[in-house]
């Protein structure tokens, strides 16, 4: 609670995105390996990467969804310029048949 003469600083909500990808079935194993390496490195090395989770649609292993949470827009932009992300994009360029990025507005983010 702010007192007279003080302003309370409100932190902006994190940046949350959902990536919907379709992967070439013939390259699925290699894609998953590249994705796993990229996610592990991003979470370990980038303080602004709060969470990266990848899942496949049940029964459709080539339909990959990535749930991304970054501290803010600057952290996201920094992530896009990181060497490990650039390597992931270059490595998987021919593996990804389609990519749709969905912008979101966080309502409630919670975890244990």
Image (tube, rainbow, N blue to C red):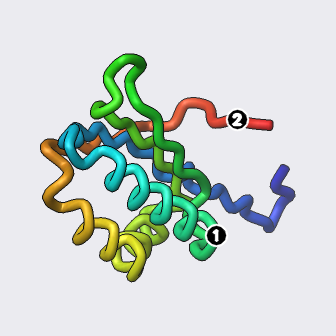
Which SS class for mark 1? Answer: helix
- Assess whether mark 1 and mark 2 are in contact (beta carbons under 8 angstroms): no
- As rendered, which of 74 and 58 lies closer to the eye? 58
The residue that appears at 32% across and 75% down in the rendered structure is 87
Q: Position of residue 43 (x, y in %)?
A: 60, 64
Q: Earlier in the sequence, mark 2 or mark 1?
A: 1
Measuring from the top left, give residue 68's x and y in whole percent.
47, 48
Q: Residue furthest top?
A: 59
At horizontal 35% and vertical 30% (from top left) the residue drawn is: 61
Closest to the observer: 25 or 50?
Answer: 25
Rendered view: 45 above or below 76 = below
Identify the residue at image location x=83%, y=60%.
4
Relative to 54, is 56 above or below? above
Can you identify the residue that label 1 sits on? 44
- In the picture of the structure, the residue carrying the numbered disc 2 is 110
Residue 67 is left or right of residue 1, and the answer is left
């Amino acid at each position: 609670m702010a007192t007279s003469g003080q302003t309370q600083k409100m932190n902006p909500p994190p940046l949350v995105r959902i990536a919907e990808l379709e992967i070439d079935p013939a390259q699925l194993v290699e894609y998953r390996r590249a994705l796993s390496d990229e996610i592990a490195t991003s979470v370990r090395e980038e303080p602004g990467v709060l969470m990266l989770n990848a899942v496949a649609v049940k029964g459709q292993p080539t339909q990959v969804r990535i749930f991304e949470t970054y501290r803010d827009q600057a952290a996201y932009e920094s992530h896009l310029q990181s060497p490990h992300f650039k390597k992931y994009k270059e490595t998987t360029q021919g593996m990804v048949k389609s990519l749709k990025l969905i912008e979101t507005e966080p309502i409630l983010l919670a975890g244990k």
